[in-house]
């Protein structure tokens, strides 16, 4: 029986390692300094890199975090502290629904909400779309972590003559910093690789764009457009981009685990 | 507002009732707590003694579906009057809980300073002075003075409980409520806290809930015996434990039930 389980576990790991191996095999050769420092070259010229896409992904994730993280944490704290009533049930259900909405639908939604009124594709629109994906992830992980703080810690704060709000913000959340950070990092890792909503919001850009008002390049979209191109060199660059994306997500995941492992996760 | 404080009573409880939902946990209790004494609340589990003292700092009502009614007079003010903010009341009536509960992710210093810091006092010199005085009053200073930046949760159980006492004392409440403060501690830590209580009563009025009758007899000046939500008997500890007026009290303290 245990042999069978071992085989099943091994089978579950095979896809992960074959994806990793395949991406490294195909992409490692193109992952050089040019890749990180140069703009994409026009069709017909060799060389070039994805510097703008890398910066774009950072801009998009930062914009999304600025919008999504405060909302997500606020929603999570609400669910944990006041979420036992009817409103809490509704909010929790809505959060779960939001978490399972296909990301292309969120892209369409933001297209009509931001892209059309702004008159064009923009990093801002992409950030909003990714933020909407982040909110439920951050909210539910925050809720779970804050709920772990025992009632008697809250009561100790109240008994000192501290208002409920201050007890939550200054005492309860203080013990949850590492747990909430972990949730935020997992959300970042999740949205860093999102492609579908970006096609409808931030589109792509062959040049530098450091603002948030114009279309912006991003690793996933650049990978997509290179991968469907007919040129071998672009295919190679797409593989390198894929490798970089996988590595980024991997590093963020590992960091998240390390942060959570340092304790102070709300346990007393 | 006149003559509410005619005698030495610091807390006057009048017709206090408390409920959890439909369950009537405390039945119309009236009691006067004298200043700078230790009053022990004893009784079997579920008799309403914890609920009773949680009403004295309006903490009871923070539990969902819990409510209380009646009057509790402190310094010529009914803390259950409609215009009273429970947050302000709790600064005057401190509380120590059954399980030591230092704030997580806070140093020993910050735990003691928390009450002041969160009410807006930031001057480092003031905080340092208050932290040292409170830790000395809680008989913990000598043990922690070299590691004030260590996490509060790194201390032993007995030390954590004294840290919680220091934290409560830091805001200088005239009244300190203690809800079975030694029931989670070993005998040596318990003895330390009992000794501490004897010293503290020079400054603070203490109301302590205990399920340990020997402890009540050792440390208290007055004893109140609760049974099924009723205050059965209240008087000098020496009287309650030697010549109780009520037969139910006698049966409880001689170990016939409970």
Image (tube, coloured by chain):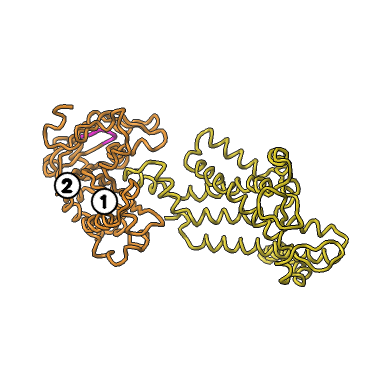
* Colour of chain B in the rendered structure image: orange
Nearer to us in this view, A38 or B113: A38
At 62% from the left and 48% from the top, the residue drawn is A134
**Relative to the observer, which residue lies in front, B247 or A196?**
A196
Residue B228 within the magenta-colored segment of the rendering: yes
Position of residue A22 relative to residue B163, above or below, is below
Q: Name the subunit of mark 2.
A: B
Q: Secondary structure at mark 2?
A: loop
Could you classify mark 2 by the number of other residues whose Cα lies within 10 Å: few (under 14), some (14-19), or many (20 or more)? many
> Residue B32 appears at what percent x and percent y?
17, 35
What span is in magenta? B227-232
Q: Rounded to the nearest whole Å, what is the CA distance between mark 1 and mark 2?
A: 23 Å
Residue that badge 1 annotates: B170
Q: Residues within 10 Å of mark 1 (few under 14, many from 20)?
A: many
* Residue corresponding to mark 2: B220
At 22% from the left edge and 45% from the top edge, which residue is drawn? B255
Side of A133 relative to B222 (left or right): right
> Chain A appears in which tint?
yellow
Q: Residue at x 47, y 60 (%)?
A: A263
**Quarter in which the C terminus of chain B is drawn:** top left
């Amino acid at each position: 029986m245990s042999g069978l389980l071992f085989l099943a576990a091994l089978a579950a790991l095979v896809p992960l390692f074959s994806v990793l191996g395949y991406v490294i095999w195909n992409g490692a050769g193109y992952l050089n300094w040019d890749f990180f420092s140069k703009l994409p070259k026009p069709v017909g010229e060799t060389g070039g890199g994805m510097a703008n896409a890398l910066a774009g992904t950072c801009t998009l994730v930062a914009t999304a975090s600025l919008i999504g993280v405060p909302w997500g944490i606020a929603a999570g704290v609400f669910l944990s502290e006041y979420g036992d009533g009817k409103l809490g049930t509704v909010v929790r259900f809505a959060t779960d629904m939001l978490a399972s909405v296909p990301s292309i639908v969120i892209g369409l939604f933001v297209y009509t909400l931001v892209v059309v009124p702004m008159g064009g594709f923009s990093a801002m629109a992409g950030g909003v779309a990714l933020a909407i994906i982040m909110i439920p992830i951050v909210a539910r992980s925050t809720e779970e972590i804050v709920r772990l703080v025992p009632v008697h810690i809250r009561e100790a704060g109240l008994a000192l003559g501290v208002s409920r709000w201050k007890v939550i913000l200054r005492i309860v959340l203080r013990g949850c910093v590492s747990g909430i950070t972990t949730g935020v990092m997992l959300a970042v890792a999740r949205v860093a690789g999102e492609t579908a909503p970006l096609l409808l919001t931030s589109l792509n850009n062959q040049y530098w764009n450091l603002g948030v008002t114009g279309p912006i390049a991003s690793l996933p979209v650049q990978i997509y457009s290179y991968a469907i191109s007919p040129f071998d060199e672009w295919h190679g660059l797409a593989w390198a981009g894929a490798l970089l994306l996988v590595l980024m997500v991997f590093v963020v995941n590992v960091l998240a685990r390390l942060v959570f492992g340092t304790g102070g996760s709300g346990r007393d | 507002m006149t003559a509410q404080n005619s005698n030495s009573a610091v807390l006057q409880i009048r017709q206090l009732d408390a409920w959890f939902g439909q369950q009537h946990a405390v039945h119309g209790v009236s009691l006067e707590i004298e200043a700078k004494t230790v009053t022990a609340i004893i009784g079997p589990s579920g008799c309403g003694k914890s609920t009773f003292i949680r009403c004295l700092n309006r903490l009871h009502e923070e539990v969902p579906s819990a409510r209380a009614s009646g009057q509790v007079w402190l310094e010529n003010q009914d803390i259950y009057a409609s215009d009273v903010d429970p947050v302000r009341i709790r600064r005057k009536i401190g509380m120590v809980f059954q399980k030591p509960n230092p704030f997580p992710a806070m140093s020993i210093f910050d735990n003691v300073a928390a009450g002041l810091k969160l009410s807006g006092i930031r001057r480092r010199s003031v905080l340092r002075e208050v932290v040292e005085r409170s830790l000395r009053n809680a008989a913990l200073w000598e043990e922690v003075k070299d590691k004030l930046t260590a996490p509060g949760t790194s201390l032993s159980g007995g030390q954590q409980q004294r840290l919680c006492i220091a934290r409560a004392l830091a805001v200088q409440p005239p009244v300190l409520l203690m809800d079975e403060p030694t029931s989670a501690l070993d005998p040596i830590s318990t003895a330390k806290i009992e000794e501490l209580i004897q010293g503290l009563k020079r400054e603070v009025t203490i109301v302590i809930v205990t399920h340990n009758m020997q402890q009540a007899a050792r440390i208290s000046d007055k004893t109140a015996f609760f049974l099924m939500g009723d205050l059965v008997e209240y008087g000098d500890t020496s009287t309650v434990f030697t010549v109780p007026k009520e037969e139910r009290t006698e049966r409880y303290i001689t170990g016939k039930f409970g």
